[in-house]
């Protein structure tokens, strides 16, 4: 029997964060096996996004798709790589719309002091791109040396509030599977599973990002802008400047990349 048009057949989860935050290791923790490549030598590979399917993750049998990408506001990137990362993130948003929308944002952060860079990625994805319409949770990694991993949150929760980072839930974890931290690894996996199952949206959210063909992209400079596209571009640029602290010129380029890619 054919599926009904528009039927929701998967829950799509986006894991984002800066390079080196442990996103791939987090995905392997969720799957309890190695399905994502890890390692600092994979720098260029992580500039794109990857889809991982976990068909038996949810009790209701709903397909779980995990998309991992990188945060855009990353000072380590060279200019060409930075531009490419924007394009890849833009294509990811359109791919998510094709797959039915986004059900949850998982902000993966490495154990560190709370700072403005942490806030910038949060504001970019949750506020600017998704307009706070998709639930967001945080997973803090690399806490195997903490006697009690949750203590990181106790120490830093107030600072997150000061930087206006507000998440629906969190998990403090280790992704190491070493013998010395076996119990922490097991607890981490259970915590992340519970976090996702508790906060994933029942109805996925579509970003309503248009797909622009090659001919349309070529002709765009020679025709009058679509009023709706221009409105979306202006709103996104405003948010990138106001919420994410981007310079005007950069915010304009990023907004155009997202709206017209």
Image: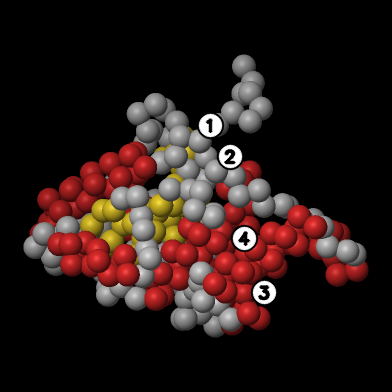
Label 3 secondary element = helix
Name the N-terminal-most of marks 3 and 1: 1
Rendered image quadrant of residue 115: bottom left
Name the N-terminal-most of marks 4 and 3: 4
Contact, mark 3 vs mark 1 (Cβ under 8 Å): no
Q: Real-space Cα distance between discs 3 and 1?
A: 36 Å
Q: Real-space Cα distance between discs 1 and 4?
A: 23 Å
Numbered label attached to residue 176: none
Residue at the top extreme? 1
Q: Is residue 132 left or right of residue 152?
A: right
Note whether 118 is above or below 93 in the view shown: below
Numbered label attached to residue 90: 4
Asked whether residue 71 is in view, the answer is no
At 90% across and 64% down in the image, what residue appears?
A: 223
- The residue under label 3 is 252
At 86% across and 59% down in the image, what residue appears?
A: 215
């Amino acid at each position: 029997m054919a599926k009904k048009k528009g039927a929701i057949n998967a829950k799509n989860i986006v894991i984002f964060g800066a390079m080196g935050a442990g996103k791939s290791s987090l995905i392997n923790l969720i799957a309890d096996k190695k399905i994502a490549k890890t390692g600092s030598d994979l720098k260029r590979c992580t500039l794109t996004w990857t889809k991982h399917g976990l068909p038996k993750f949810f009790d209701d049998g709903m397909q779980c798709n995990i998309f991992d990408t990188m945060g855009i506001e990353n000072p380590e990137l060279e200019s060409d790589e930075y531009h490419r990362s924007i394009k890849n993130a833009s294509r990811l948003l359109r791919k998510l719309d094709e797959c039915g929308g986004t059900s949850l944002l998982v902000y993966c952060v490495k154990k560190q002091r709370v700072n403005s860079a942490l806030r910038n990625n949060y504001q970019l994805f949750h506020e600017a791109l998704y307009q706070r319409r998709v639930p967001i949770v945080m997973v803090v990694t690399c806490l195997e040396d903490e006697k009690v991993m949750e203590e990181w949150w106790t120490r830093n929760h107030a600072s997150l509030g000061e930087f206006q980072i507000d998440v629906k839930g969190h998990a403090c974890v280790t992704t190491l599977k070493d013998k010395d931290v076996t119990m922490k690894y097991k607890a981490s996996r259970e915590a992340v599973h519970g976090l996702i199952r508790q906060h994933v949206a029942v109805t996925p959210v579509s970003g309503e990002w248009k797909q622009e063909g090659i001919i349309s992209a070529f002709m765009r400079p020679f025709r009058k802008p679509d009023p709706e596209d221009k409105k979306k571009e202006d709103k996104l640029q405003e948010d990138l400047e106001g919420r994410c602290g981007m310079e005007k010129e950069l915010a304009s380029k990023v907004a155009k990349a997202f709206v017209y890619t």
